[in-house]
Amino acid sequence: MSVQPDGRRPVNRFAAYDTDVIVVIGSGAGGGTVANELCQRGAKVVLIEAGRRHQPEDFINDEWASLNQLAWLDERTTSGSWRIAREFPNLPAWTCKTVGGTTVHWAGCCPRFKEWEFRIRSEHGPVGGASLLDWPIGLSDLEPYYEAAEDRLGVTRTNGIPAPPANNNFKVMGNGARRVGYTGVSTGRMAFNTVPRDGRPATIQDGFNYQGDKQRAHWSTLTTEIPRAEKTGRLDLRPSAMAIRIEHDGSGTVTGVVYVDAEGNEQRQKARVVCVACNAIETARLLLNSASSLFPDGLANSSGQVGRNYMRHVTGAVFATFDKPVRMYRGETMAGIVTDESRNDPRRGFVGGYYLQLHSLGPSFLATFLNPGAWGRDFAEIMEQYDHMAGMFLVGEDLPQQGNRVTLNRDVRDQFGQPVPNVHVDDHPNDAAMREHAYAAGESVYDAVGALRTFRVPPYPASHNLGTARMSARPEDGVVNEFGRAHDVPNLFVSDGSVMTTGAAANPTLTIVALALRQADHIEQQLKAGAL
Amino acid sequence: MATITAAARAIYPHDALPDDVYARVGEKLAEAACEDPGTERTIEDGVSALNGGRPFADLPADEQLEALKAIEGSDFFELVRSTAVVEVYSDQRTWQLVGYEGPSFDKGGYLDRGFNDLDWLPDPEAGA
């Protein structure tokens, strides 16, 4: 037994040669949840996490300083026609590198996927340029797990949990939305406490979500799943450990994981089962970097689909200025939603749907992202309207494409000597049409309550990264089966948003947790049956 | 340093802000120059070019703007602008100017400090 740096809980340290452990790589929504579930069911788990362990009280309520504390900033490259490749070429995604993963900076929006969003190939028919595929499961398969996930995350408006109160920013968006005739307008289903619950306090509306939640009112794996797993005595959490390769034997069964520890030393942990949950870019990269003579194109990649079908949602933001103060930064950042446009109505000029969601940024990030590269007196005057500004986020379904993909850039190496991931994205015309429609919808909402000016903000580095190891019924169409189990490798699982066959319009975390719970059931059954 | 300060102010002109806010940009660039000789050269060359005629800091605002537009898109300009956008808008004096109150955790959040005090619109229906 050794003691954590915070001195609170003793934890087990399993031996490097212990072939009985399950190794989970990544401690976010998928990895943190599956690790805890497996510990609760009696399994020994080694949880490898690239980032450091922070305590919530150490989070920094200052946008750039916080980004440097929590974000994944390792070298990456980009290509393709998306604006990110020009404006933020080394930051394609805004995810976290810390214990708790991207749940740490998650604002907590919890819409479920809709029934038709699991089968958009059938719903839409073929769409030129897109690699649409139906999921091997449907909503009914996931419903019990959605219910369990909502209870676990403490989602408002479920399980008798009170709705979030309307904050200033929502008063603007909510009134505007009603005036233009929208009816699906509410403060949303959110994974933060409106009343004390599950050992965590009610929100004090401190206005910081994307920088981590100092008060623990938000669910994250850092504050829930991981400490609970530690209490079982069966979790061996290894922070500051960067997995660089998954190894296998001559029969193609995975045998362990090679990682670089905090001191820069290479370590090898044996494993009975490996679950990969590194977020879509790093999951694909790790599988590709694990190529061998048996798996020359990358581990679990006989289909050639590893890294392909990368999705990041159709996103954007609309901000507006008003003649009276708004103070959008006060309170929970994303507690508001308009659902009317989340239906599939091809008469709008695109397939799939989108949501309008509440959103604010501090001056530091707003100045960077409002109109990247802009400067001069007009820009400065807009910034001086900051406290008279309201904001919303646009999030909708983007279509998977074979060419939107994560590949290895062998010309650029990271601090561990590994090829870095290159992320290539070209917007599909359907994505562009949806974004235009969403901008216009957002502007009309603000115009209805007297906006002086409105601003169309281009997509940020993505926080929703999906699809690079997609689920498929047939092995030739994807990387994993309906349980996230690799088609090619029986004891290898993918446990994050990479498995999403298509991305729906909804923010993905709730679905990632539901899928992780379903996967944990499957792994437990397979272990009991002696099939793993 | 005076050149960088003047350039940063011309790029993000907030007349009410003191020069100290814009001076942060030059300090940041001096740090970057220490770390990388290429960056040091970019800054030295860029500053010399801006001061090719009269000192840039002494030019009237419209001529400063013209000089900056002439180098917009250059590595030097983008280095100054991208540093300035972070430094200027992360400064608490700027936050005060634009009406941003910043961190609230130590004060109990905004729960009792106006998170829902907007009164020029009705309270929206809670919705389902």
Image (cartoon, coloured by chain):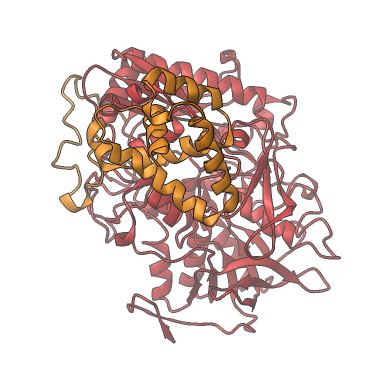
Chain colours: A red, B orange
Q: Residue furthest bottom?
A: A1
User: What residue sits 46% from the left and 46% below the top?
Assistant: B29
Can I make out residue A466 in this image? yes
- Residue at 34 percent across and 57 percent down: it is A59
Viewer-proximal residue among B101 and A257: B101
Q: Is residue B39 above or below residue A19?
A: above
The residue most toward the front is B54
How far from the left and from the top, in percent, is residue A86?
Answer: 61, 34
Q: Could you say where residue A117 lies in the image, as x and y percent from the top left?
A: 58, 34
Q: What percent of the width, then of the height, locates residue A512?
A: 52, 50
Q: In the image, is A53 to the left or to the right of A295?
A: left
Q: Is residue A346 above or below residue A384?
A: above
Q: Quadrant of the N terminus of chain B?
A: top left
Q: Quadrant of residue A375?
A: top left
Which quadrant of the figure has residue A24? bottom right
**For the C terminus of chain B, which image quadrant?**
top left
On the rendered structure, is A27 left or right of B103? right
Residue at position x 73%, y 64% from top?
A: A490
Please tell me which residue is depicted at 61% across the width and 82% down the height of the picture: A16
Q: Is residue A283 left or right of residue A373?
A: right
Q: Residue furthest right?
A: A293
